[in-house]
């Protein structure tokens, strides 16, 4: 499960739209003419890794408009990946996953949170990763709405996504193992707040 090729393609697409002033203005005018909910695509910045989720989500929402725009300009090569079901399933999966990760990030940034609150969010997310991989094994895409919207997702791809979620769970386990080691000390916080 490698997100880099998908990220590179999405960034290239966004840069194609935004880097040329005339194309960018025409794209925004096109979105306005089709009464799109969104008026533009977002830039991706490597400094803010969470921006990838926002960029993916926006491109996902605008994918039909992007395809129509480039076909109208007779530049369909610029967006051919948005018409490829195999690539779209990867894009949909990573968009869904990044949205789940962005939700975790927002929960962890809330005001007045103690370390036990953050640890609870991390534990819950690790449980979700197990749930998600188990559901993918059963071809249940209920937590992956964008992926579920792809007409026929290759079962081999679903297996790769399942394996990727298991690897991500392992990464969370290893990166936050210090919290697990002090679990009993963290359990004292809920007792103090009551």
Image: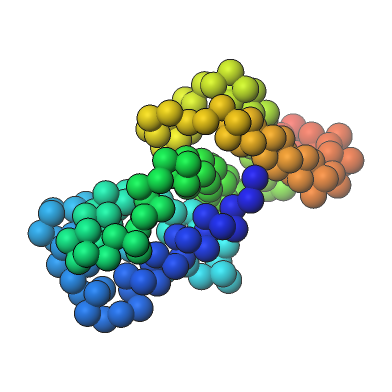
Q: How many marks?
A: 0
Query: Relative to 139, does residue 106 appear above or below in the rendering?
Result: below
Q: Residue furthest right?
A: 181
Q: Residue at x 29, y 60 (%)?
A: 76
Q: In this image, 169 relative to 6: left or right?
A: right
| Quadrant that contains the C terminus | top right
Which one is in front, 4 or 134? 4
Q: Residue furthest bottom?
A: 21
| Residue 9 x, y percent position in the rendering | 48, 61
Q: In this image, 41 relative to 32: left or right?
A: right
Q: Residue at x 52, y 63 (%)?
A: 8
Q: Residue 185, located in which quarter of the rendered image?
A: top right
| Residue 88 x, y percent position in the rendering | 43, 44
Which one is in front, 10 or 70? 70
Q: Residue at x 56, y 27 (%)?
A: 155
Query: Relative to 21, does residue 89 appear above or below in the rendering?
Result: above
Which one is in front, 189 or 96? 96
Query: Relative to 87, does residue 58 appear above or below in the rendering?
Result: below
Q: Residue furthest top?
A: 138
| Quadrant that contains the N terminus | top right
Q: Residue at x 52, y 21 (%)?
A: 140
| Residue 116 x, y percent position in the rendering | 72, 42
| Residue 164 x, y percent position in the rendering | 67, 40
Which one is in front, 155 or 124? 155
């Amino acid at each position: 499960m490698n997100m880099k090729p998908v990220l590179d393609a999405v960034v290239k697409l966004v840069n194609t739209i935004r880097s040329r002033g005339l194309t960018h203005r025409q794209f925004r005018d096109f979105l306005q003419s089709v009464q799109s909910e969104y008026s533009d695509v977002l830039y991706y910045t490597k400094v803010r890794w969470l921006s990838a989720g926002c960029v993916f989500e926006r491109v996902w929402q605008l994918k039909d408009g992007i395809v129509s725009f480039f076909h109208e300009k007779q530049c369909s090569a610029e967006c051919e990946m948005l018409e490829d079901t195999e690539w779209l399933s990867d894009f949909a999966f990573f968009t869904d996953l990044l949205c789940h990760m962005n939700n975790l990030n927002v929960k962890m940034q809330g005001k007045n949170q103690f370390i036990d609150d953050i640890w609870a969010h991390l534990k819950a997310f690790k449980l979700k990763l197990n749930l998600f991989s188990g559901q993918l094994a059963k071809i249940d895409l209920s937590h992956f709405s964008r992926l579920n919207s792809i007409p026929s997702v290759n079962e081999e791809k679903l297996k790769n996504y399942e394996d990727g979620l298991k690897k991500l769970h392992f990464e969370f386990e290893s990166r936050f193992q210090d919290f697990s080691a002090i679990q009993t000390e963290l359990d004292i916080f809920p007792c103090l707040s009551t």
